[in-house]
Amino acid sequence: MQKNMEENTTFFGVLLERIESYSKTTIDLIKLKAVDKLAKIVSNVVYGVLLSLFSFFFLIILNLALAFWLGDLLGKVYLGFLIVAGFYVLLIIILVLFKKQIIKSPITNTIVTKFLK
């Protein structure tokens, strides 16, 4: 009877150690997955910021060239700038009217999809 009790104690001791080891491994795995997701998100944000910055400078120079070119065609430089500005006012109006369909829903869906991968 004493031997059977010792075997049970040893069995439960080993079982407890394995449960503890499994729990630690599971927690470590969850941490690693969270770090991986965070690293991917941060790298995507940095990439997006750099791409946006370079695109911004490209568009500024392109718009200046377009405004001067249109102004040259129309004989008044300020008319070229007014046409380019009018185009951007039109884009702003479209964005304000359709912000949920154009901006909010796609961004929300992308973020949720990235987190659930």
Image (spheres, rainbow, N blue to C red):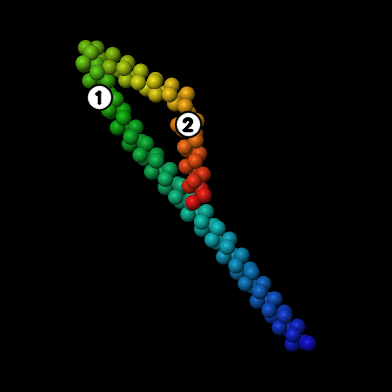
Name which quarter of the figure residue 28 lies in: bottom right
Q: Which residue is disc 1 drawn over?
A: 65
Kind of residue indicated by mark 1: Ala
Is 101 positioned to the left or the right of 13 in the image? left
Specify which label sits upstream in the sequence, 1 or 2: 1
Residue drawn 42% across and 45% down? Answer: 44
Q: Residue furthest top?
A: 75
- Could you tell me residue 24's position as x and y percent? 59, 65
Kind of residue indicated by mark 2: Gln
Residue drawn 75% across and 83% down? Answer: 5
Q: Residue furthest right?
A: 1
**Mark number, residue 101:** 2
- Could you tell me residue 83's position as x and y percent? 31, 17
Name which quarter of the figure residue 66 lies in: top left
Looking at the image, is mark 1 or mark 2 nearer the viewer? 2
Q: Residues within 10 Å of mark 1 (few under 14, many from 20)?
A: some
Residue toward you, 36 or 90: 90
Quarter of the image with the N terminus in it: bottom right
Residue 51 vertical placement versus 94 (above, below) = below
Is 110 positioned to the left or the right of 19 in the image? left
Element class at badge 1: helix
Q: Do tag 1 and tag 2 residues touch (Cβ < 8 Å)?
A: no
Residue drawn 74% across and 87% down? Answer: 3
Q: Residues within 10 Å of mark 2 (few under 14, many from 20)?
A: few
**Mark number, residue 114:** none
Q: How many marks?
A: 2
Residue 54 vertical placement versus 36 (above, below) = above
- Could you tell me residue 49's position as x and y percent? 39, 39
Is 98 positioned to the left or the right of 74 in the image? right
Residue drawn 43% across and 21% down? Answer: 93
Q: Residue furthest front?
A: 101
